[in-house]
Structures are given as structure tokens and as C-alpha cells.
Image: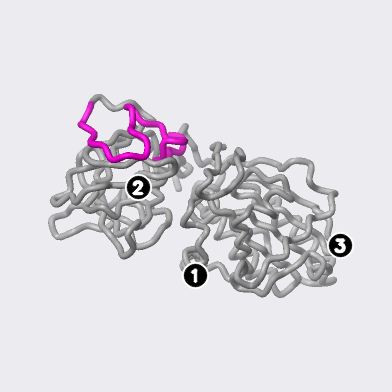
Amino acid sequence: MKLKTVLPLALALAATLTCGAAETEGEPMPGNLAPEIPTYGPERWINSEPLTMEALRGRLVLVDFWEYTCVNCLRTLPYLREWNRRYGDLGLVIIGVHDPEFGFGRERKNVERAVEELGIDWPVLLDNDFELWRRYANNWWPRKILINPEGVIIHDHIGEGGYGKTEEVIQEEIAELNPGVELPPIMEPVNPHDRPGAVCFPATPELYAGYARGRYGHAVEMDREARYEPMTPHDVHRAYLEGDWRVEEGRLLHVSLADPPGDRVVIRCRATEVNAVLHPELGGSYRVYVDVDGMPVAKDDAGADVKWDEEGSSFVEVDAGRMYRLLDAPTYADRELALYATGDGFGLYAFTFGACVEAPGE
């Protein structure tokens, strides 16, 4: 699990939060009556009119606490999509409760875009004030809570994993709601890393770009523009700045025009997968060049968002505030990854990592 503290930019209360891949049973929620959903207007709902637990009595409800830049949440979506397809017409209602970690995640247009791009067609509540989050005494992204037709919590799972058990509980309830219904076999693992025999190595913990939670290998100036000189060697699990930057509480901003790009953020990490949460602070879009160990990202190691220009340099095109997939390598290694700024619209919030490899023979 990775501890997260929501900053004032995203939440007006101080709380310790977790976004992690570990498979964990929840606090002793099962057996309790599910809290009522706060009374929000239609502007707080996507794909639905406002819902209440009272109105959903008689249905099986899956409450999914998620955040659209959280890599662990994104990895659970194939299962949610399939459960919705399989059981949505048989009484299952999924409610995605979106609690934003970063300021741009509070904007409806950004969540709407993510919902569309991610293929989410179930109701999504914009829980920007973390009201429903607090009613469940939650501290985690993702978290899945099943509520039976009587409004009682019957299953609670934190983090990734546990998909088979969750679907078993869904099927038990669906069978009671639909006597005689034929149900499909429990889903096979969708993600290769969910399959038996997959090996997960120790990954670099999440690296934040703001000074409140950042782990830099050097001192940073807070809330002011500063020039940072290159330094070596680079310690693992640390970030380093070169060039003109402004480090704020929850983000890092590039503050000069860099043409050709030379100002950069360097991280040394141990991982198979590297992602970055980026945002175009001035609107529009901008290009961020990426290299690994001083070379363009190899096609076999590239994350889904990486492209290459005519000269073979690798980059991502940042056109929205979201998580960008930079590296998805088949092997675990100690790597040095650099992001090069090409303008002053560069906004970096965090790096996330994965370190699992498929089972031998897959």
C-alpha cells in the first residue's frame, strides 16, 4: 500500500489515504447498514440522475471508490466493465465514487473525459468534498463494497485483487434475485499480472512532485522559481531537477521556454512499469520527451502513451490532466528515466510504478 495525504488543493481536510495494489480485506464493515449517499444535485453525477440508497433497495449495489489518475484503480476497470455487462440487467448497480487526489480532478469536464475514454457506463458520483468517503471511514483507492438488496454491507475489499471472491458474492446475490438464472463461470484473470505464478518485485514507491510529499535528491526552493544544476550520482527512489522549475505544494511547474528541450526531471527507479500524472497548466497541449538510461524508449518497453518523432526520439503528448503510461517493460530493472520540458505549460504531479512480471511461460 502507498500512503497518500490529500493536500488542501484537492481536499479541505487533512487525511491519510492509501492507493495500493495489495489485496486486503476491509475494516469490519460487513453487517452494517450502508450509509446514505449525500444529497447532491445532477451536476455531481455522470451517467445518471442522483441516486440514493433508499431508492436502490431491492438491487445489489457495488460502491467503488476510485480516482481516475490512480493506476491501481485503472487496473480494476476490466473487471468492473465485465461485471456490469454480465449482471447489470439482473439487478447489479455499480456506483463509481470519484474522490479526487489532485486539483484538476475536481473539474467535472476532466472526469467526464476520463469516464468516456475509459469506457465507464455506470453511474459516477463526483464526491469532491469527500462526504461519502468519510461516511464509509475510507482511506483507500480503490475500494469495493457490496451492499445487498436490504441495504446491508456484505462484502468489502481494498486494493487490487480479490476479483474471484467479489464475483462469487455478486453471483450469490444475483441468484437470489433471479431464481433459476444461469450464471457464467467466474471470470478468468484479465491482467497478466493477476494470473497465478506472476512475480511482483519491490517497486519504487510513488514519487510526488510537490514539496509536501516529494522525495527529491537535493534541496528545493518552495513556491518560487529557481534554477537547478545537474548533479550526480542519482540515488534510487529519488527525483532530480535540472533547469528552471517552480516546486509548489502539490505540483512541479516548468517556468521557461526550453527549445530545444534541455530542462528535465530525472528519476532513478526500480520497476517494470512507470506512469506520470501530467497536466497542461496553460491549456492546449504540449510535448514531453522521455528517455530511459539516456536513450529513447524502446518500442518493446514503451507504455501505451509513448510516441516517436521523425528522429526516433520518444515523447508523450500531454493534452489533458491524467495519468500517462511511459514504460511497460517485460523485465524488472534499476532504470533512470528523464522527462524533458519543451515549454512553460509543463505540470507534473506524481510518478507511479509497477514491478510485476508475467508467470514463466506466459
Which residue in the structure is indicated by mark 1?
A: 116
Q: Secondary structure at mark 1?
A: helix
Q: Earlier in the sequence, mark 1 or mark 3?
A: 1
Indicate left or right for 7 with 63 as reference: left
Q: Say if 242 sits above or below 287 in the image.
A: above
Category of crowding for the residue at label 2, using alpha-carbon neighbours closer than 10 angstroms: few (below 14), some (14–19), many (at least 20): many
- In three-dimensional space, the C-alpha distance between marks 3 and 2, rounded to whole angstroms, equals 45 Å
Measured Cα–Cα span from mark 1 to mark 3: 32 Å
Residue at 46% x, 36% y: name it: 212
Q: Residues within 10 Å of mark 1 (few under 14, many from 20)?
A: few
- Residue 335 lies in the magenta-colored region: no
The picture places residue 82, in percent across and down from the top left corner, at 60, 65
94 up-or-down from 224: above or below: below
User: Amino acid under label 3?
Assistant: Glu
Mark linked to residue 202: none
Residue type pointed to by label 2:
Leu
Q: Main secondary structure of the magenta part?
A: loop
Q: What amino acid is at disc 1?
A: Glu
Q: Which residue is mark 3?
A: 150
Mark 2 = which residue?
327
What colour-coding does the image apply? one colour
